[in-house]
Image: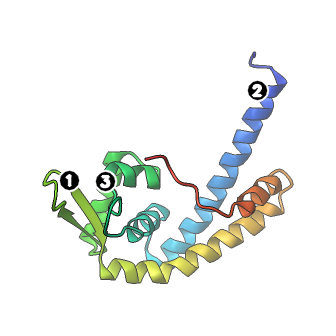
Amino acid sequence: MTATDPALTALAQGWCALSLLHGRIEAHIERALQARHDLSVREYSLLDVLSRQHDGDGGHLQMKQVAEAVVLSQSATTRLVTRLEDRGLLERYLCPTDRRGIYTNVTAAGLALLGEARPTNDAALREALDEAARNPELAPLVRVVESLKEPVTLPA
């Protein structure tokens, strides 16, 4: 393949469209969450991921797994956890079976804020997708997003 290969150009155009869709959705949700709940998209995502933890095998996520789930580096995830911990929305504790492991849980205040913010997030997502669906270049991608019924899971 060369740089002028039509297949490569089409692939690059598809990637640009997907990137544009993602950026528009994220910006729309960011504005809504910031305005109504003083949360960023990343903060909301982190609270959401951590709220889904449970006791038992594989129930608590290591920081590496959390970083992958919120699509941040481990250091950026640690800074984000610290900010939310400072706001009283998260708490850290040592793993009872491996004193080197540190887990993070959502506090009651964090769960309450997440519960308040979830409808805002969902409505903003719907609005952003509806707006993107009116763009002929983005409409096919919106249909794909809307057709996904099962959550995407990362390999362990």
Residue 123 as seen in the image, left or right of residue 8: left
Question: Residue at 45% of width from left, 69% of height from top?
Answer: 48
Up-down relation of residue 28 to residue 23 (above or below): below
Mark 1 is surrounded, within 10 Å at the Cα level, by few (under 14), some (14 to 19) or many (20 or more) other residues, namely few
Q: Is residue 40 above or below residue 17?
A: below
Q: Residue lying at the far top in this picture: please name it.
A: 2
Q: How many numbered markers are drawn?
A: 3
* Numbered badge on residue 82: none
What amino acid is found at the position of numbered circle 2 in the picture?
A: Leu
Q: Is residue 121 left or right of residue 148?
A: left
Q: Is residue 131 above or below residue 10?
A: below
Q: Which residue is mark 3?
A: 62
Residue lying at 82% horizontally and 57% vertically, measured from the top left:
139
Amino acid at circle 3: Gln
In the rendered image, residue 78, in percent from the top left (x then y), is placed at 29, 54
Label 2 neighbour load within 10 Å: few <14, some 14-19, many 20+: few
Instruction: Find out whether the residues at labels 3 and 1 contact each other: C-beta distance under 8 Å.
Output: yes
Q: Which residue is mark 1?
A: 101
Please tell me which of labels 2 and 1 falls first in the chain. Answer: 2
Residue 20: image location, x then y, percent:
69, 50
